[in-house]
Image (cartoon, helix red, strand yellow):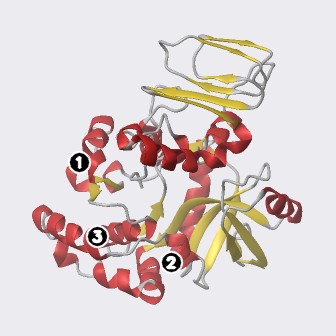
Amino acid sequence: MAGGVGSRFWPVSRAKKPKQFLDILGTGKSLIQQTYQRFSKICPPENILVVTNEIYVNELIKQLPEIKPGQILSEPSRRNTAPCIAYSNLKIKTLNPNANIIVAPSDHLILDEHKFIEVIKTSLEFVQETESLLTLGINPSRPETGYGYIQISEKRDEKFKEIYKVKNFTEKPNKETAEKFIESGEFFWNSGIFIWSLKNINRAFDKYLPDIADLFSDVKNISDSEKENHFIRKVYSECRNISIDNGIMEHADNVFVFPTEFGWSDLGTWDSLYENSLKNQEGNAFNVDNVLTYNTTNTLFNIPKNKLVVAEGLNDYLVAESDDILLICKRENEQKLREFVRDVEDQKGDDYL
């Protein structure tokens, strides 16, 4: 899934080129390039489908030239993850109605790829043998308020002892609640990575999202590219905006979670980037070398290579610059970023988005 705008990474992530197409970590590869290479080790490259907004198709082809046109699913508008997955399911049905599927965002950081591949292989075996919907839960390392949480029940699968039945999904909690979650030992971060069979996820759509299932039911509608383009434009104009979590995962009674750890971060926030960045002895993190700091601690700098920054007296700040925007914000107030972006749009126009 590669259609998001990455607004929580503003101003570096912009509507014209969101974070999945950026080299956020300074590795020489964008997040989507890293994700593609990761999954190329799990399944044949021709089995990888990328769903993205139509305005990003050219950028996608530029960054992943090995992707063929038939592997790109172009969305005319954003309708959240449930329609995105329903569209993918319809496409996969034309290729292999007995398929097992991994659904993954394109902008996640995974440090231990070997462990990740092992977890995915076990997950595929699990959904092959059971009529279950599986999600990956991440062992929490801190009371993070920017992630959703999954609560496990005591019931484990009899064969796959490391996989638990899901008790509850919880949206992003406040800090006090997140701390209680960590103390209980029953909660894991919701990675947003799902594994299931095509047949079982389609059954779930039929039961819990029948309106969306009905829209994406007939493979004849995508029998050729011209027909598919016309069909998708029509369907997306009628389809409601809803996530797969809210639409299916929070309601289905056959949802399981695989609690694990493989150096995961969704890199959804500046703070998550700070947590995954190298820091000097003052706790400052830099994406470039041309920053001079004085009496400055625990601050993240993300600035263009051609700029020199001199900072004095900052503690726990975020300093980010991209093109014509400079953001200076207390790290603890990062959750206000969406408010900032809304105000920028209202007062300055969408040129800065």
Q: Which residue position holds label 1?
A: 68
Q: For mark 3, does the 10 Å Cα neighbourhood hold few (<14), some (14 to 19), or many (20 or more) residues?
A: some
Kind of residue at disc 2: Gly
Classify mark 2: helix, strand or loop. Answer: helix
CA separation in Å, label 2 and label 1: 31 Å
Q: Which residue position holds label 2?
A: 247
Q: For mark 1, does the 10 Å Cα neighbourhood hold few (<14), some (14 to 19), or many (20 or more) residues?
A: few
**At which x and y percent is residue 122?**
60, 62
**At which x and y percent is residue 113?**
58, 43
Q: Which residue position holds label 3?
A: 236
Kind of residue at disc 3: Tyr
Q: Is residue 108 above or below residue 200?
A: above
Q: Is residue 283 above or below residue 149?
A: above
CA separation in Å, label 3 and label 2: 17 Å
54 vs 206, nearest the viewer: 54
**At which x and y percent is residue 126?**
58, 71
